[in-house]
Image (cartoon, rainbow, N blue to C red):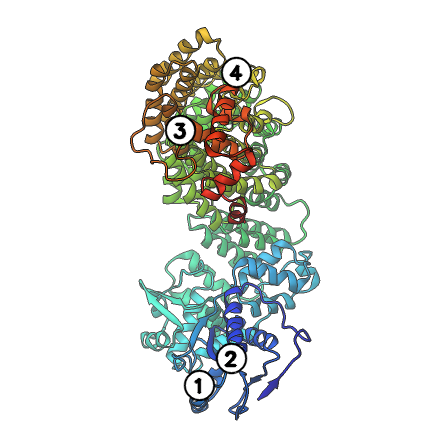
Amino acid sequence: MTLSTTVPGALRPPELHGRREEIAAVESLVGRLRAGRGGALVLAAQPGLGRTALVEHARGICPPVPSVQLTVPAALPRQGPLLVCVDDIHAWPSAARSALLADLRRLPAERPVAVLLTVAEHHAGAGELGGPVTLRLGPLDDTAAAALLDRLTQGSADPVVGAWLIREAVGNPRLLTALAAALTPDQLAGRTPLPDPLPGGEDLLDAYAARIDALPADARALLLLAAAAAEHEPDGAGADLALLLRAGGAASGLAPAEAAGAVVAAGGRIHFTHPLLRRAVLRRAPLARRGAAHARLAAVCRDRLSRLVQLSCAAGDHDARLAGDLAEAAIAPHPHAGRSAALARAAALTADPTLRTDRLAAAAEASRLAGDPVRARALLARTAAVPAHGGVHRVRGLLSLADGPAADAREELITAAVLLPPEPARHALIGAAEAAWAMGDAVAYREAMTRVPACADDPALEAYRAGMCAVLAGRTAEGHALLRGCLDDVPATGDAAGLLRAGAAALVVGEVEAACGAGARALAAVRAFGPEVLLPRALEHLAYGELRAGRHTRARAHALEGLRAARRTGQPNVAVSLHAVLALAASVEGDAEACTAHAAAAAAGAGPHGLAQAATLAVWAVARADLAAGRPGDAAARLAPLVAPGPRCGHFAVRMLAVPCFVEAAVQAGRTAEARDATAEFTRWAGATADRLAPAQLARCRALLAPPQHTAAAYENALAHHDRTPGEFERARTQLLYGQWLRRRRRTREARGPLRDALVGFERCGARAWADRSRGELRAAGEAVAGEREPGPGPLEALTPQQQRIARHVAEGATNREVAVRLSVSHRTVDHHLRNVFAALGVRSRVELSRLLAGDGGLPDRDEEIAAHL
């Protein structure tokens, strides 16, 4: 028994990462004790997850109330409040556990005693503590594990090394601490290759393996075979039970292993209940027994690659023949994760440094294609210091294209292209061009594509290469003709990468429906045949195509699925692009909060990684939301740098798409000269693209800029163009602008028709904020809107609908001129209505009006609004 009355602040336990809920529960227990009330809490967890650290935390914060830590049965002090801590109560004999629990239950109810017990799951005693509240500790998430590793290494760990350590520790803080401590400073810093397997944590693995020590011999033998069979399988895949039985495992061993909670059998496969238990079974077995298990599995494997992998696990340090057989077998069609495991084993058996690096680079590429960038980078970290290895540069560049700065990816891939043979060099250059595209560097894109050799063996790729070069060289007609050939040459069941290129070519030409079709086929191909790494990219292409086609709900659904896939496969750059697509969808649907959040997420990733296309889309989304909310000045200010030529312009493939929004905002904000310049350039672009919406959008821009005597005819011309093309949202926007113009000219009866059509169009495509604007315009035109909410009681009830809108805008801080622009009325009209508002409400200033509406709920409280976004 250890009694403690430590002075507060004298000694604090080490910082606990990722344990906010558990710390709160422990501190709540201590708080009840200080308040004169007792309580009990049980912390249950697998070994190494921090049970003892939480006990130390409780004792550190308990003073001035004394605490006692029992390590053996002992008598408790008889008086005063007390914190009783028993760590690892499962290690006590059953009789001692029962006696302690009985003593605690017999304590007087009026005596404040808090009890904190910890128990290892799946151990004796875990089921005896049903009375107290039990809190089960899970593994640390990656963020908490990274914070712990940073503290352990004082920030000296290389990011690639750190990611692999976190992966290997599977959220176990004790194992992460041991793994980091076992590496040399050069290994931690990434200057020398990591050992395989990683050393460290043997005592923790012993604690896991101790769970099976009492099992019968046939159960232990079956578990060793299962651990050996699953060693190079993807996480969670388990081991084939039929294979284990063919290898000599006894079926009778399965029931006791399941009863002990070591494994679960499902679907003909055996799954360990914890990855560290599988690792512990292998690590604890003597080398000879482990090798014999692999040899027995190899003898009964029916798949050549699996048989060779098992033989390699039983082999010695180097075996050139076996390594060559493994590398050869890995070329045949196999899941990318399995190919990576085979190539990594081949590399481990290879003595020649250059050949070993070749095989590690190939293994890393297979892991990348499997959607496992952490393993891919860890494999590259094992490569020897072979100077200027093209395969290593290529894989690093492709990994950076998915999760790093685009400029770094481009340089790595350009370097790789110099060092590689023609075929892989061609694909490296295409990757470099993709990086330049993401950066918005048209010159660098064209340079990379120009360096790609003519692809006589792949007509679709050659048409894409030549067509993109022609477009960026200013030969638009020639380029579009070639890109259409690219679409024609894609087979009905082509590879996913080729289909994604075809979709990109269709968007450049303006064939939006063709782009959606190619994107859908690419998605189907990835789901059927892989590779997994292309899934988020296929969903991104399809979401963007649906967005261009005006199908915003579909675009949002595909983008959300793509976002989950991008996170799962470690592709934050793709996630950034998907956030931008989601921001654009939200700007149509009228969800301003979602638009702002997704645009902020896109900007946060696009800035550091130089992703100009995603950044441009995100700004466009926020500007369109400004337009929907009646803030044309803000929208014009955001879009002006993106649509104007010059160094601050937006992405070369996106800027023309945003011009119609800019022209609308600029005209309403009084920036007419800029709107005319943008319309002139949009006219040239619309003449070259096949985008079916472009003529209608151009006609709308011209109507916004037309003199009054020609405006009505210009809007009618724009609507005639819309009649020949799909696109409900864009048509409704034209109708809304036409109705606004008619109402501003006091032609209210004529205005109601376009405004009604606009309202119906916006409602059909789910554009809520735009529909609200249409309703407001209809009210101002003197028409009641069906289904509209009745105004609630309050200070604005006595005002007309127009006065209510003006009052709310002014109370939000808008000037009279800004209100006039938002509501499409004159400055003098706003002045007149505002004077009447002040008189009707009995206020004398804009400040008083703002306070009145905020107090009534007519405006959000700014402090609450700010707090809600933190």
Other-residue count near label 2 (Cα within 10 Å), few / some / many at <14 / 14–19 / ≥20: some
| Residue 528, image x, y percentages | 36, 44
Residue at x-position 48% and y-position 83%: 89
CA distance for labels 3 and 1: 66 Å
CA distance for labels 4 and 3: 35 Å
Q: Which mark is residue 801?
A: 3
When asked about the image quadrant of residue 655, the answer is top right
Query: With respect to residue 436, does 382 lie above or below?
Result: below
In what element is the residue under mark 2? loop
Q: Name the kind of residue labelled 2 in the image.
A: Gly
Q: Nearer the viewer, residue 208 or 498?
A: 208
Q: Are marks 4 and 3 in contact (CB under 8 Å)?
A: no
Q: Are marks 2 and 4 in contact (CB under 8 Å)?
A: no
CA distance for labels 2 and 4: 76 Å
Q: Which mark is residue 36?
A: 2
Q: Name the kind of residue labelled 3 in the image.
A: Pro
Q: Are marks 3 and 2 in contact (CB under 8 Å)?
A: no
CA distance for labels 3 and 2: 60 Å
The tag earlier along the polypeptide, 1 or 2, is: 2
In what element is the residue under mark 3? helix
Q: Which residue does the numbered mark 4 point to in the structure image?
A: 679
